[in-house]
Image (tube, helix red, strand yellow):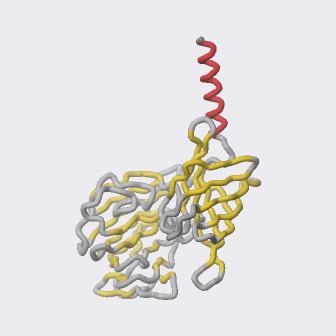
């Protein structure tokens, strides 16, 4: 009996070890060719994570060009071919999104068919770890917004609704997002914001990871509400103030490791961001990126934007 149990344990351990080194397992940064608003084709970032569950099943998470990370109950992989389907999130269609691709020479390529029936080609490479072997040495703080005009900033869209009013960077209505001209690797960011009731925005770190900005007073802590890294990391508790009040983020990003202080209270402490969030500017996670703020979800104001980069 002991020999049988030992054999079963050895088999399970061996199978588990093999799954840990599955060629598909891990995070993937994707680029998707999709139709843009002008009828042309542009590249949108996307993200895929595959993990093993038990002895042989693969599961995962997927982030499209918008929305949050969605769970994949089973990822199918055979002879180098990957496939899965997931239900729609914000799409106003019933069919599931389908993902079909091939793994060759360490790279992914294939086709995504959205719930509306449109097919989009994609390519993918393994996401970098972004592990830092030492704590950063901080440089001098940089004031990103001068409180007078849009110097150092650029709108990302045909409609630039951003204005400067009473020392704040203001989006009075939905329109374009806005980002810094400068790009950064690791940094500490101080930023203040104010929202009217029911409004929504977001601060994208390196243009890829969204720290949610939303009217969340009285809501439970959740990654899609204020204080969360959208779709990935829940805040420890909800430290939101009421709509119409000025609020403050102090965020430290080192590699993937993020810490968030909301209104003076630590709500995320040294958590790893798995991958890009929906609405990211690109999926090149190893590259430096700008600070971007959403302007397409409702009115918002920002002020006192100061970034301290790592040397």
Horizontally, residue 279 falls left or right of residue 174, namely right
Residue 42 position, x and y percent, is 63, 77
Asked if residue 215 shows in the view, the reply is yes
Horizontally, residue 15 falls left or right of residue 180, namely right
* Residue at image point 65% right, 26% down: 11
Nearer the observer, 119 or 163: 119
* Residue at image point 55% right, 68% down: 65
Horizontally, residue 256 falls left or right of residue 97, namely left
From the viewer's perspective, is residue 47 above or below residue 207? above
Residue 1 position, x and y percent, is 59, 11
* Count of numbered circles on the image: 0
Residue 257 position, x and y percent, is 46, 54
Residue 244 position, x and y percent, is 24, 75
* Residue at image point 43% right, 62% down: 230
Nearer the observer, 140 or 67: 67
Q: Quadrant of residue 112?
A: bottom right
């Amino acid at each position: 009996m002991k020999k049988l149990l030992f054999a079963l344990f050895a088999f399970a351990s061996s199978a588990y070890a093999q799954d840990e080194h599955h060629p598909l397992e891990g995070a993937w940064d994707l680029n998707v060719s999709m139709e843009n608003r002008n009828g042309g084709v542009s590249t949108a970032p996307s993200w895929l994570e595959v993990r093993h569950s038990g002895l042989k099943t693969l599961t995962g998470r997927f982030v499209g060009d918008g929305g949050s990370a969605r769970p994949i109950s089973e990822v199918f992989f055979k002879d180098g071919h990957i496939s899965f389907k997931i239900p729609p999130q914000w799409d106003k269609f019933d069919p599931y999104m389908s993902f079909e691709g091939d793994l060759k020479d360490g790279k992914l390529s294939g086709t995504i068919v959205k719930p509306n029936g449109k097919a989009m080609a994609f390519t993918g490479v393994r996401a970098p770890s972004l592990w830092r072997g030492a704590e950063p040495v901080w440089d001098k703080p940089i004031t990103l917004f001068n409180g007078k005009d849009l110097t150092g900033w650029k709108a990302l869209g045909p409609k630039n609704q951003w204005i400067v009013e009473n020392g704040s960077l203001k989006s009075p209505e939905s329109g374009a997002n806005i980002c810094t001209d400068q790009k950064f690797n690791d940094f500490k960011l101080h930023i203040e914001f104010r929202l009217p009731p029911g409004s929504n925005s977001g601060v994208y770190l390196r243009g890829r990871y969204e720290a949610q900005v939303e009217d969340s007073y009285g809501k439970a802590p959740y990654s899609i509400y204020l204080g969360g890294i959208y779709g990935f990391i829940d805040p420890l508790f909800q430290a939101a103030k009421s709509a119409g009040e000025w609020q403050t983020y102090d965020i430290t990003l080192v590699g993937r490791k993020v810490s968030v202080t909301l209104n003076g209270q630590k709500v995320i402490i040294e958590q790893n961001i798995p991958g890009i969030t929906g609405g990211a500017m690109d999926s090149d996670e190893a590259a430096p990126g700008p600070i971007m703020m959403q302007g397409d979800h409702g009115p918002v104001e920002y002020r006192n934007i100061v970034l301290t980069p790592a040397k």
